[in-house]
Image (spheres, helix red, strand yellow):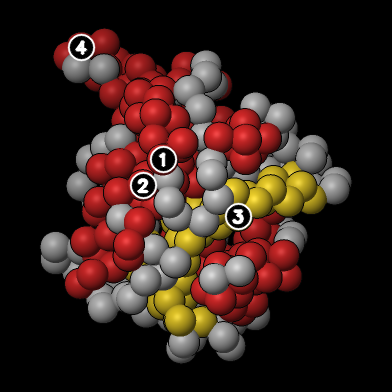
Amino acid sequence: MTPLPQTLDAPPAPGLAFAQTGAGRDVILIHGAMTCREDMAIALFSALESEFRVTAFDRPGHGQNLTPVAGAPWRQAEAVHAAAQSLGLVRPVVVGHSFGGAVALAYAQRFPDETAGVVALSPIAFPEPRLEQFLFGPRAMPGPVGFWCHSLGRLTDPLLLPVLWRAMFLPQAMPAGFAEQFPFALAARAGQMLAEAQDAALMAPGAAWNTAGYGACRTPVHILAGDRDLVVNTALHADGLARLLPHARLTKLPGLGHMIHHFAQPAIADAIRELHAGV
């Protein structure tokens, strides 16, 4: 398995922590909730590095971006764009998974002329009540309520998070490479859990902001989703997104759950290739 190169101990000021591999046309990878850039790197670096320059970012507040300030999807998209500009990335295809898919869709709307396309993997596309809003959202509340919710959460996280990490792969099992290489302790640190809380609290308004712009989105978007996703409702999010976006293509992957980037690398590579070719 390809090592994860250029892993930084701290983000390059004023950008985001990242890992990068390969050479060629640019691809940006944006991870989802409860993970960091290593999730996308473990899944996709070896599949893409022979053809593309691939850069996986830690989203704000996640991984080695130690300040626990996340922000709505459009704010995170602005941070990813600024980091991409500082690294000299040119008109990338932006690949986002789950909450990272919401960030990638915001990126498409904010920077259409600087984006070759978006690959939205199991994306959260619309506001809805979600489990993470109840599990993590209260930690982002100001004052004593947020303090006590966060303190209680830190006591229960060692039991809860391993269950959630395994559950998000269902109906598939967690791949051995992920279990061996993913930095679980980093993803479970207190600062990241506060960022997860902010993500959960801002998920609904962020998705609503995205939704308001779908009809005018000029960026081509390829949507990939498993038809057995237990985390994000494919019928609501992937199907609904494909109906609203003017330049969308939807591919449903039979038998796959939420973590499709670990099991459908050829389909993802094909989507990236087609977007860079303008197909």
Q: CA distance from mark 2 to mark 1?
A: 8 Å
What residue is disc 4 on? 144
Identify which residue is drawn at 64% across, 77% down.
47
Q: Earlier in the sequence, mark 4 or mark 3?
A: 4
| Distance between mark 4 and mark 3 Cα atoms | 43 Å
Q: Indicate whether 275 appears above or below 133.
A: below
At a point 46% along the width and 88% down the height, the residue shown is: 23
* Image side of residue 80 versus residue 174, left or right: left
Q: Give the residue furthest to the right.
A: 255
Type of the residue with mark 3: His
Identify which residue, 173 or 74, lies in the foreground: 74
> Which residue matches tag 2?
109
**Disc 1 and disc 4: Cα gap in Å?**
42 Å
Characterize the local packing of mark 1: few (<14), some (14-19) or many (20 or more) Cα atoms within 10 angstroms: few
Indicate which label's residue lies in the foreground, 2 or 1: 1
Q: Earlier in the sequence, mark 3 or mark 1?
A: 1
Residue 222: mark: 3
In this rendering, the label closer to the viewer, 1 or 4: 1
Q: Earlier in the sequence, mark 2 or mark 1?
A: 2
